[in-house]
Amino acid sequence: MSSRPGRIHGSLERARGWARWAALGLGCLAPTLATIGAEFQINAPAPTLDRWMYPFGDFDGARPVSPTWASFDLRFDTRDGQFLLAWDTANRIPTNAPASRYLVTKVRVTVEHSPLPSQPSFVYDPTYDSYRTYLTNALALPDGDTGRPIELYGVGYRGGFNALSFGEASSFGVINSINNPTNVSIGTRNAYAADFGTDGQLRDISNNVGQAFEPFEVAPFAVGQTTAVAPGEVVPDGTRFAFDLDLTNPLVMGYLQTALRQGRLPVMLSSLHRARAAAGGIGVGGGVYPNWVTKENLLGEPATLLLEGVLISDTDTDGDGLPDDWERVIFGDLSQTGEGDFDGDGASNRAEFLAGTDPRNAQSRLRILSVTAGPGVVTTLRFPFASSRSYRVETSSLDGGWATAGGTFEYSGSGEARWQASAPSAAALQFYRVVVAE
């Protein structure tokens, strides 16, 4: 992927007697296939595949319900029972366009709860709970509300699988390995609930409560909501939960764009409702947890997907440097130009198209937000980032051109990135710019 440095917008700043230059560089009806440069909508009444991801269950995708539960038995993933859902999109949306050209405007997954006749139902909780409220030791925090939430995540793969190759009959993963026969399945499942680590890559969150690993907070793509009952009330049979994915999170948006580019959108349902009534104890039943209807269920309604957006083509009929589709989506017509600056923030409309920022919002532009630097100090830059873009930091001194600077990037769901140099700076004067390439 080549970088395309473009127009520079920045200012000379001084701190600690040290000059830095912050610069912006730019770089279910019968399916009908949408065309590039067209709006798309998928309203799927059932998933292409759904499967209970549990080490001792459903290896052919035929169960009528898939429970999500937590195990606090040290031999298992804490998020022991997960529910994999996937929808093929290639028959409605063209694949293999640049990921950033898929402008997704809405994604909603709905799933139906159907408790077993002999099992009491769980309590509705529409808010995320910190991992610290699940801990089984003295460090646990009290849960501020009743119940536990249902969470939706992306899906990560191992064992040579990917979103297109993992199916309802694929291998779950390593169970009772020879080297560790008492570890039933910790960290071995071939498809797992995943959010994003600070490196911007998918990470397995099956053990975020920390039984076998250091605990950490997770960031669900969505938390299940329902209007059937009030928070704190018992969820009745047939209740449908809606999961509206957070499209303001550029990591989530990038996940969706990549999925559409590949032609399949997988998600994983997870919750930390106890599978057993007691805190530990092998063979202690009586847990209270959700049971989700699958497409094989003859009584309930399977999971549905509503997905809307626009696939941007390169067509630029007025030759103004802006793709027509993007211009219509953003501005409503073709009256703007690439050289124009609609929001007056110093970045041209063309620059904002390439950077993935909003040319209607003066606060949305690629810029260096802060710099920590100086001789003997590891330089740190903070800047906003957009979905499906890759970045590099370039450096220059007064007597030379621009060169790529070695360092590491960190990304957060809030849309802010941080870059740190690989070593302390020895220079008294250094210039930096951030370059983005589609």
Image: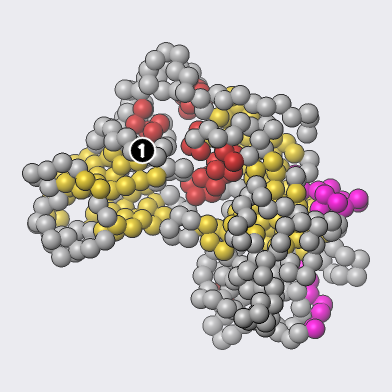
Task: Give the x, y percent position of residue 420.
Answer: 29, 58
Q: Residue at x 72, y 57 (%)?
A: 170
Task: Give the x, y percent position of residue 393.
Answer: 28, 48
Q: Residue at x 45, y 13 (%)?
A: 317
Task: Give the x, y percent position of residue 37.
Answer: 55, 24
Of residue 42 and residue 181, the one placed in the foreground of this image is 181
Please tell me how many numbered marks the rendered image carries: 1
Task: Give the x, y percent position of residue 256.
Answer: 57, 44
Check the picture and name the quadrant holding the N terminus: top left
What's under tag 1, amino acid-wise?
A: Ser
Q: Can you identify the residue that label 1 sits on?
A: 2
Q: Quadrant of residue 70?
A: bottom right
For the stretch drawn in magenta, the main secondary structure is loop
Of residue 227 and residue 57, the one placed in the foreground of this image is 57
- In the picture, measured across the screen, residue 144 lies left or right of residue 286, that is left
Check the picture and name the quadrant holding the C terminus: top left
Residue 79 visible within the image: no
Q: Residue at x 72, y 74 (%)?
A: 274
Q: Which region of the structure is painted magenta?
A: 283-304
Query: Furthest-top residue in view?
Result: 318
Applied colour scheme: secondary structure
- In the picture, measured across the screen, residue 54 lies left or right of residue 136, that is right
- In the picture, measured across the screen, residue 4 lies left or right of residue 87, that is left
Up/down of 384 relative to 71, above or below:
above
Q: Quadrant of residue 238?
A: bottom right
Up/down of 363 relative to 294, above or below:
above
